[in-house]
């Protein structure tokens, strides 16, 4: 079963190292063309409930400004000498910062804010934006992480059930049937 559109899967872990390990497993699935990763965000809440977020993909205004400044400086210097480089670098930095602010190519910032509250204190969640998902391969990887939980997903209902079964959160209704 393949899910073609971008879908969100948020898996909770009791240990941040397990969340990192699962991201590595997802990257391995991508390398074997069993999933396509578009973004990954770690949401960690300490026991007191304070949340921290680590994004892996989005262009921030700072990154956009730095990239724009470097390109503007280079092109401005080639076209107008040192003064052109300064003007081009400054103008491009502003444009790059604006671009980083306007373009959110991965998991939307509003969704990340909402997930901060959905993650239980003392746990870490890994939110993955995926497409071209091989559900069977994902199930096999998830089964290697006992104690992990599905925090949230916009996969189809059948896919969510399969994920919950792989995580041991739900019994497989077909397992009781005799062959």
Image (cartoon, rainbow, N blue to C red):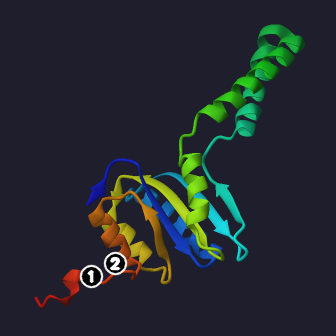
Which mark, by number, is residue 87? none
| Rendered view: 172 above or below 80 | below
Residue projecting furthest to the top: 80
Residue at 72% across, 28% down = 68
Residue at 64% across, 40% down = 59
In the drawing, does residue 177 fall left or right of residue 65? left
| Lower sequence index among marks 2 and 1 | 2
Residue nearer the viewer, 111 or 9: 111
Mark 2 = which residue? 165
The part of the image, by quadrant, that contains residue 113 is bottom right
Q: Marks 1 and 2: in contact by CB < 8 Å?
A: yes
Mark 1 = which residue? 172
In the drawing, does residue 157 fall left or right of residue 23? left
Please tell me whether mark 2 sits on a helix, a strand or a loop: helix
Q: How crowded is mark 2: few (under 14 residues within 10 Å), some or many (20 or more)?
A: some
* Quadrant into which the C terminus falls: bottom left
Please tell me whether mark 1 sits on a helix, a strand or a loop: loop
Residue nearer the viewer, 122 or 25: 122
| Rendered view: 179 above or below 118 | below
* Quadrant into which the N terminus falls: bottom left
């Amino acid at each position: 079963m393949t899910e073609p559109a971008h879908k969100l899967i948020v898996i909770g872990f009791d240990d941040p190292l397990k969340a990192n390990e699962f991201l590595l497993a997802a990257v391995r699935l991508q390398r074997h063309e069993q999933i396509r990763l578009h973004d990954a965000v770690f949401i960690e809440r300490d026991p007191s409930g304070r949340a921290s977020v680590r994004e892996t993909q989005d262009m921030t205004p700072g990154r956009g400004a730095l990239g724009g400044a470097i390109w503007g400086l280079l092109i401005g210097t080639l076209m107008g000498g040192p003064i052109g480089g300064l003007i081009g670098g400054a103008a491009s930095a502003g444009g790059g910062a604006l671009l980083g602010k306007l373009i959110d190519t991965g998991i939307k910032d509003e969704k990340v804010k909402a997930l901060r509250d959905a993650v239980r204190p003392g746990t870490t969640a890994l939110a993955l934006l995926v497409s071209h998902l091989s559900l069977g391969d994902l199930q096999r990887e998830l089964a290697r992480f006992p104690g992990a939980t599905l925090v949230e997903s916009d996969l189809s209902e059948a896919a969510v059930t399969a994920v919950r079964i792989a995580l041991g959160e739900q019994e497989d209704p077909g397992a009781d049937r005799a062959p």
